[in-house]
Image (cartoon, helix red, strand yellow):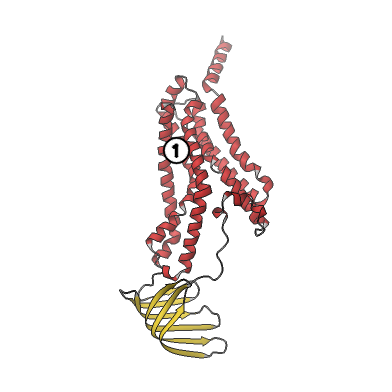
Amino acid sequence: MRILTRYIAKQVFIGFLLVSFSLLTMLWLTQSLRFVEMVTRQGLPVYLFAEMTSLLMPRIFNVLSPIAVFVSVLFVYNRLNADRELVAMQSSGISPWQNAKGALLVGLLLVFFNIYVMNWGVPIAEQRFRDLEWRVKNNLTQMIFREGEFTTLKNGLVIFIDKHNDDGSVNGIFVSDETKPDIKTTLTAEKGRLIQTDKGSRILFINGVRQEINKKDFKFNTLVFSRYSAEFNNIDKRQKKNASVREKNFWELLHAAKNPNLTPQEVRKDIVEAHRRIVAPLYNLVFALMACVGLLVGLFNRRGQAKIISLEVLAMIAVSGGDLIWTNLAGRSLYVLPMLYINCLLPLLICLYLLWFYSPFYWHRHITARKNFDEI
């Protein structure tokens, strides 16, 4: 590898890390707002909050990676052009293809890394996130009941605790249970303790009263007890939802038509996701070449390259928009699926052609010589 290629690749890679880290940080902050209520009102532990929000990052990284590499490549090559480094390289006989090898190297590296993230990192992170989310929403032990506050749970339970003791027990516990539509139950006790069992969370009441009223016939029952145990495990009795497309592996998505449990719409969605896992990583290479091709094959302008940069940005937006449009249409009809590859490979082939075959200095000298000949 030439020193020049290593120099450009290093600059592009450092820029990519800075841009991607900045974008991931901003999006992490916006995504974390979804879980702030769990921390402030439901007492979700901070370590679980950090883990849940971190598990969203692989999914976001796949979306931001092509944009980040486009911005970093565009910035590095524009700086090289502004510092006249590209002019010196081209004047010494270095072709646009050789100058683009640094961006090409970083783009290929990110293609392979994104393939790994999309096919292994994201499914594992999505499964872990769904398990944590289900456990936090349905497991009573994940809640921290604050002293002197009423805590409303998901399934119609309201729990009030007067005081927490150092041994884990509580003083002054009140529970209102309206999980059954026709029966309302209230439990009050002097002391209590939260117990986690294999079947779920239970509350042990000590020295209390259980009152129950039937809303249909208005029968009222009272029970005075010294010890009473009840299950209040805020768990949805229904099974967990089926795995989402992000949680499935590549072969499972690609052969979704063989799964009899899926509807035709779900089959199309899985197949499109499988092909997206092939196409999406390639955009790192496409956008890296799109960012540098204009500055390498275009003629130098002392006033700046604002027009070329604007065209490159518009081209990147058009390709990204096309990918989004064809993905949505492919979810309705698989006949549109080849357009996903055309939208990705066509810009790639155009960039490779311009970098490999197009020589701006040759055409510039040819046009200049032709003008001089006509003047003579």
Mark 1 sits on what residue?
72
Q: Is residue 199 among what the camera can see?
A: yes
Task: Give the farthest residue toward the top.
Answer: 376
Residue 99 point in image, percent of width and height: 47, 27
Count residues near mark 1 (Cα–Cα under 10 Å), then give few for <14, some for 14-19, many for 20+: many
Name which residue lies at 50% across and 79% down.
Answer: 178
With respect to residue 351, does 267 lie above or below?
below
Q: Amino acid at mark 1?
A: Ser
- Along the horizontal axis of the image, is 274 left or right of 202? right
Q: Quadrant location of residue 11?
A: top left
Residue 116 point in image, percent of width and height: 50, 45
Seen from the viewer's position, the closer of residues 186 and 246 is 246
Residue 201 point in image, percent of width and height: 45, 73
With respect to residue 103, does 213 lie above or below?
below
Q: Secondary structure at mark 1?
A: helix
With respect to residue 329, does 371 lie above or below?
above
Q: Quadrant location of residue 182?
A: bottom right
- State which quarter of the image contains the N terminus: top left
